[in-house]
Image (spheres, rainbow, N blue to C red):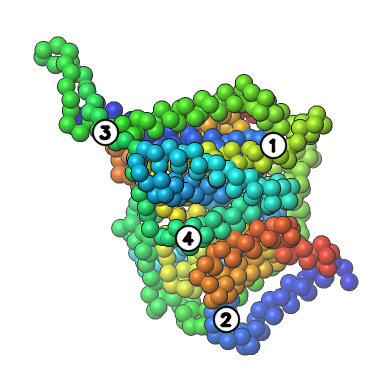
Amino acid sequence: MDFGPHLLLASLEGAVAAAILALTAIGLSIVFGVMRVVNVAHGEFYMIGAVIAWWVASIVGTHPALGFVAALVVAPLIVGMLAATADKFILQKIDYDPDRTIVATIGLLYIIQQITLMTFGPEARPVQPPFNTRLALPWFEFGENGFEMYWPWGLSITSYKLFVIFAAIAIMLALWMLMTRTKIGLIMRATQQDSDMAKAFGIPVNRVYSWVFGLGAGLAAAGAVLVVPMQQAHYLMGHDPLLLSFIVVIIGGLGSLPGTVIAAILIGMSDGIISVFFSPTLAKIIATLVVAMVLVFRPNGLMGRSN
Amino acid sequence: MTDSKRSIILHLSFIAVLALVFFILPDYHTGNLARIMVLAIFAMGYNFLFGYTGLLSLGHALFFATGMYGLGMTMQFFDLSSGSAFIAGLICALLVSAIIGALALRTVGVAFMIITLMFSQAGYLIILYFGEYSRGDEGFIIAREARAFMGFDLSDETNRYYAALILFSICFLVIAKLVNSPFGRTLIAIRENEERAKMLGYDVAKYKLIAVIISGVVSGAAGASYALLFGYVGATFATVQYSIFPLLWVLLGGAGTTIGPFIGVLFMFYLIDLSSVVTPAYMLIAGVVLVLLTLFAPQGLAGELRKRVFKWLP
């Protein structure tokens, strides 16, 4: 394949990765922004999302699309409820102390991972994509006969991957509407800005925290349901999304949702593109160091305000 | 008795107890204890930065691994003796922590956590990338003959135990001395209120950098001695997991106490050791205990002791 089509292919793969990453990272970003705690178990919520997707899909069974849609509804709901419960019985009890929250969520991480290992098992299990047609993509080139369009071999994307990109955008738009256009969003933003003042105005801050924690975990689960037809469900799959989401949230600027999305696109795309041209390990080293340097020169992230 | 006298007695008798239990405990436990002491050095290095200076790093695996590979590689490829290889390990840790410190300290709070995490991740990947020399995840073994220091064979149980104890004691006493010195007091002042320390005229940036370097070198010493005493160098020790472990140990044992890191390592080690006897799902038990501890012992084990029994605990 020529350089141009190759780059296009890499960018498309990168866009799919970026879409999933954006969803997962936004979940973390909301929790970070509103509650000011580091949720180390975020990757595990992602993992349970994938496992529940497999479970729902294998119960429904009839047509892959039916199981997939059911999973897309059920998995985020269950995971969200689970997270809200954990928040109520653990995080609320330790008063969201930053250091202790880290230990508690590490504990949660172990618990979730082990329970999944004991019930779901160590195998990686696939979920059927609801539809998966291969779409060939054209490429334009200025040749001897003027402007030409041709179909390079291997330049294609599956319909499912396109769907993932659009689904992620749709979910993020819905979230943006929720945050800026509804009363729920108003309450969340008020709690984020000044939780004491919010409490004084009669907002049940603790309940808001539980909801936000659930919402964040639910978004991770939604990302996982989208990813699971492309990448199998496995009990250790939460590790990389956790690290990447963390990096994205910080690079984007703490508590800034647009920043998170921009950083996710940047990191997801560059990871995809760099790994086409370098060996995967070297690509990761370069990407990690470049991103770290962004923080060195912009300590508050891309969109973060200095305090 | 003044508090400082008490604390000297406490530290010395603690070391004396460790020296004596070797004769009482069965081999299996002394073997464990040697490992625990080395890991406790790592935890103490971490505690110096986290507990006393208030900087939460998620990248200490890098310093541990630097010490480890600094010793391992120089022994493997330059045939250095164990003593000079150990010093090479320390120098590597010093350089790496100075560079990382200078870059990472431009950020604060969560950004500091993430940037140290990323540097450490890059370090891990670099070790994998040069797998030809480092043998990557598989690691390499340091030959038994090479693991001798001043005529003592360090692969021998007794020598290994006391080598670990000596190194542990040095770090333990030096750090205990350091945190009670004006320098250590300044670090604590920075932890408590950075702005005020700055207002009082302290060069906060310099103090923080020195704290990172000390912490990095102590962690590197732990890595180098781990490689030397247990004869194995591998990339596993550079993974994120080994950055999270010292944080857990220190938080469990009690951040900002001299004795906390050791207690934390001891507790975690035997928690996993004992529960894996009962059930293969030992991580479940470990997880539940972690959650319970944060709920009921928020200051860590040594912190709770200090609060309830020994108010003077350093």
On whether disc 2 and disc 1 are found on a single subunit, the reply is no
Looking at this view, is A103 or A307 the one in front? A103
User: Residue under mark 2: which chain is it in?
Assistant: B
Residue marked by disc 4: A119
Q: Secondary structure at mark 4?
A: helix
Residue receiving disc 1: A208
Q: Earlier in the sequence, mark 1 or mark 3?
A: 3
Camera-nearest label, 3 or 2: 3
Q: For marks 2 and 4, give the CA distance.
A: 37 Å
Is B310 drawn above or below residue A219 in the view shown?
below
For the residue carrying disc 1, how many other residues have a C-alpha within 10 Å: few (<14), some (14-19), or many (20+)?
some
Residue occupied by mark 2 = B30
Q: At which x and y percent is residue A81?
A: 60, 45
Type of amino acid at the residue the image marks with label 4: Thr
**Mark 3 or mark 4, which is nearer the start of the sequence?**
4
Q: Which residue is mark 3?
A: A133
> Residue type at mark 3?
Thr
Chain for disc number 3: A
Mark 2 and mark 4 in contact? Answer it, CB < 8 Å. Answer: no
Q: Quadrant of residue B303?
A: bottom right
Mark 3: secondary structure: loop
* Nearer to the camera, B71 or B290: B290
